[in-house]
Image: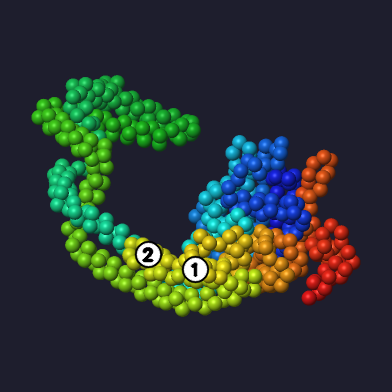
């Protein structure tokens, strides 16, 4: 439900704040007062095309902002979550609540569009930047606009399918059909991938087998190249390493003034000193640790020097191995780790290919079962649509007669698609509405024959008959009363009132017979203030409604008779 609409610098509007109520909201006012501007601004807010012509003269920027109260719905929640917009937050209390209570929960969604003459427009949803495509995806859950120039919804055959299903009460089975189609499609894609691999099976088999054998023969181990590089550097520097290690060993252990001998003498001295000064005793443990460390280092240096031996054969062996490792690294990803990962992946792919015959047989059996399941559900859905189509036709024609279209004929064509490739998540049917407004004319596709005024009234009837409450939203009718009057206007008002039981309805009208049904009556006024034109919206109380209905009945000069008539209209 649209609760609040703020408009700034759009057409004749400087700043306008309009509050709407649930039920039937009627907008009235003199011709040219700005009623359609409000509807156009709402259309732009929910993703409609913005033209710089809509900017108020002299303004460079404008904004439109709407506050919507929305009922939690899985598809809407999934859409917002996938876009990073968290709307519905569950806690323990919410989880424990009953489903009926959850359905009554209403949460806020704030949409704001900032518009610029330079075309640098911004969209915010709950204060987060959003895209126009997301806005258009949200539109079916929020607002449905029907006016003289906005009939795309009615002329879209997919909408016809949705309306028929809503009338037939098919949402549950349609969801089952959609899930079955998704499963079937996933299996088809999996089989197609397997068959593609099968076509290249022999070539791929030979390639994988060669690569696996090559890497396995190499007997790679992680960090082997680093260890070999270190050994190679040692072999190429045997003389230098021998000199360094022997010299260090001598300085620590063998020389007359070796470090260990001096350290032992120092320890003896400190032991004697500690008998006279106890503080020196604290150093003895550290000196003993140092002595042990130096002794261990000396023996390691001696053993290292004794083990050093230059081997041309071993150096050549290392050089050859490093060349081999370098070749394999270049070929399989740049490192030994990547080569080993390639080996694991190749082994997995080879196993899949070797088992592909068995896997393909299993997949084909699963695919056949999924296709049969989908077709079974889709045919069941088709049967419900065919049964509902005749009842829908009768109900719509009866409704059309009540809105001054007594001669109109309405048909629902339910055709089964002849190719499985063209079926989808909504089933195997193609549904299209056919229409004729005049006697003697054959019914033709709705988009080709319905005028703007006829389409608006037809949409009102369709929405009422189908009881479109799957996604309660705001339904807007812009001058639906064009070309009608009297009792027909009365019938249109009754239908609007009925539709407002399940959806919020906004209607722009010039007919008092329709305006009298308002749950909330808003009058749009245009005034000249300080040399500029300003548009304002006033919510009418009971006396204000009487005055406005009287004006609509008589024009500029409101008579007492018109006021009495207005009171009678409101009473009845």
Q: Residue furthest left?
A: 313
Q: Quadrant of residue 293?
A: top left
State which tag comes first along the sequence, 1 or 2. 2
Residue 239 point in image, percent of width and height = 18, 21
Rendered-image quadrant of the C terminus: bottom right
Q: Is residue 254 visible?
A: no
Which one is nearer the viewer's eye here, 290 or 24? 24
Q: Decide if residue 195 is on the left or right side of residue 526.
A: left
Q: Which residue is at 64% across, 64% downward?
A: 106
Q: Specify the color scheme.
A: rainbow
Which one is nearer the viewer's eye here, 108 or 338? 108
Rendered-image quadrant of the N terminus: bottom right
Residue 121 point in image, percent of width and height = 60, 42
Q: Decide if residue 127 is on the left or right side of residue 24.
A: left
Q: Which residue is at 31% across, 31% downward?
A: 294
Q: Residues within 10 Å of mark 2 (few under 14, many from 20)?
A: some
**Residue that badge 1 annotates:** 442
Residue 204 point in image, percent of width and height = 18, 49
**Secondary element at image label 1:** loop
Which one is nearer the viewer's eye here, 122 or 362? 122
**Residue that badge 2 annotates:** 423
**Secondary element at image label 2:** loop
Label 1, label 2: how far apart the Cα atoms are: 29 Å
Q: Decide if residue 177 is on the left or right side of residue 88.
A: left
């Amino acid at each position: 439900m649209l609760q609040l609409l703020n408009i700034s610098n759009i057409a004749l509007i400087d700043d306008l704040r309009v509050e709407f109520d649930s039920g039937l909201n009627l907008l009235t006012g003199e011709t040219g007062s700005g009623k359609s501007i409000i509807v156009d601004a709402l259309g732009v807010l929910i993703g409609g095309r913005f033209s710089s012509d809509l900017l108020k003269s002299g303004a460079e920027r404008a904004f439109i902002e709407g506050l919507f109260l929305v009922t939690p719905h899985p598809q809407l929640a999934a859409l917002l979550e996938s876009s990073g917009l968290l709307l519905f937050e569950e806690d323990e209390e919410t989880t424990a609540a009953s489903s009926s209570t959850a359905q009554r929960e209403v949460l806020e969604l704030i949409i704001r569009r900032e518009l610029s003459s330079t075309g640098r427009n911004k969209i915010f949803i709950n204060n987060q930047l959003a895209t126009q495509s997301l806005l258009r995806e949200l539109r079916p859950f929020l607002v449905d606009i029907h006016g003289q120039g906005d009939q795309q919804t009615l002329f879209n055959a997919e909408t016809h399918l949705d309306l028929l299903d809503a009338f037939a009460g098919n949402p549950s089975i349609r969801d089952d059909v959609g899930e079955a189609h998704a499963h079937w499609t996933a299996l088809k894609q999996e089989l197609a991938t397997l068959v593609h691999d099968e076509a290249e099976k022999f070539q791929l088999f030979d390639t994988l087998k060669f690569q696996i054998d090559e890497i396995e023969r190499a007997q790679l181990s992680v960090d082997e190249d680093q260890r070999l590089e270190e050994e190679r550097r040692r072999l190429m520097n045997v003389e230098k390493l021998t000199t360094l290690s022997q010299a260090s060993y001598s300085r620590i252990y063998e020389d007359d003034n070796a470090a260990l001998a001096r350290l032992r003498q120092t320890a003896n001295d400190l032991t004697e000193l500690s008998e006279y000064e106890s503080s020196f005793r604290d150093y003895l443990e550290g000196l003993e640790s140092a002595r042990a460390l130096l002794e261990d280092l000396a023996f390691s240096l001696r053993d290292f020097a004794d083990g050093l031996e230059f081997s041309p054969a071993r150096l050549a062996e290392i050089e050859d191995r490093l060349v081999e490792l370098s070749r394999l690294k270049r070929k399989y990803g740049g490192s030994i780790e990547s080569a080993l990962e390639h080996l694991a992946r190749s082994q997995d792919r080879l196993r899949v290919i070797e088992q592909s015959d068995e896997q393909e047989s299993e997949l084909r059996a699963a695919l056949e079962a999924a296709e049969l399941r989908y077709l079974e559900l889709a045919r069941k859905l088709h049967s419900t649509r065919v049964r509902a189509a005749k009842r829908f036709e009768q109900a719509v024609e009866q409704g059309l007669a009540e809105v001054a279209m007594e001669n109109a004929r309405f048909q629902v064509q339910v055709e089964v698609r002849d190719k499985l490739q063209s079926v989808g998540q909504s089933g195997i049917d193609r549904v299209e509405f056919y229409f004729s407004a005049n006697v003697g004319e054959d019914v033709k596709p709705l988009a080709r024959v319905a005028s703007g005024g006829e389409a608006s009234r037809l949409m009102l009837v369709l929405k009422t008959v189908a009881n479109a409450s799957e996604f309660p939203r705001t339904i807007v009718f812009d001058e639906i009363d064009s070309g009608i009057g009297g009792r027909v206007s009365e019938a249109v008002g009754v239908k609007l009132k009925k539709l407002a039981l399940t959806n919020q309805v906004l209607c722009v009208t010039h007919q008092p017979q329709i305006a009298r049904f308002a749950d909330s009556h808003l009058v749009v006024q245009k005034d000249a203030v300080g040399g500029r034109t300003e548009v304002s919206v006033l919510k009418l109380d009971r006396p204000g409604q009487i005055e406005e209905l009287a004006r609509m009945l008589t024009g500029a000069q409101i008579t007492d008779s018109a006021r009495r008539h207005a009171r009678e209209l409101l009473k009845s």
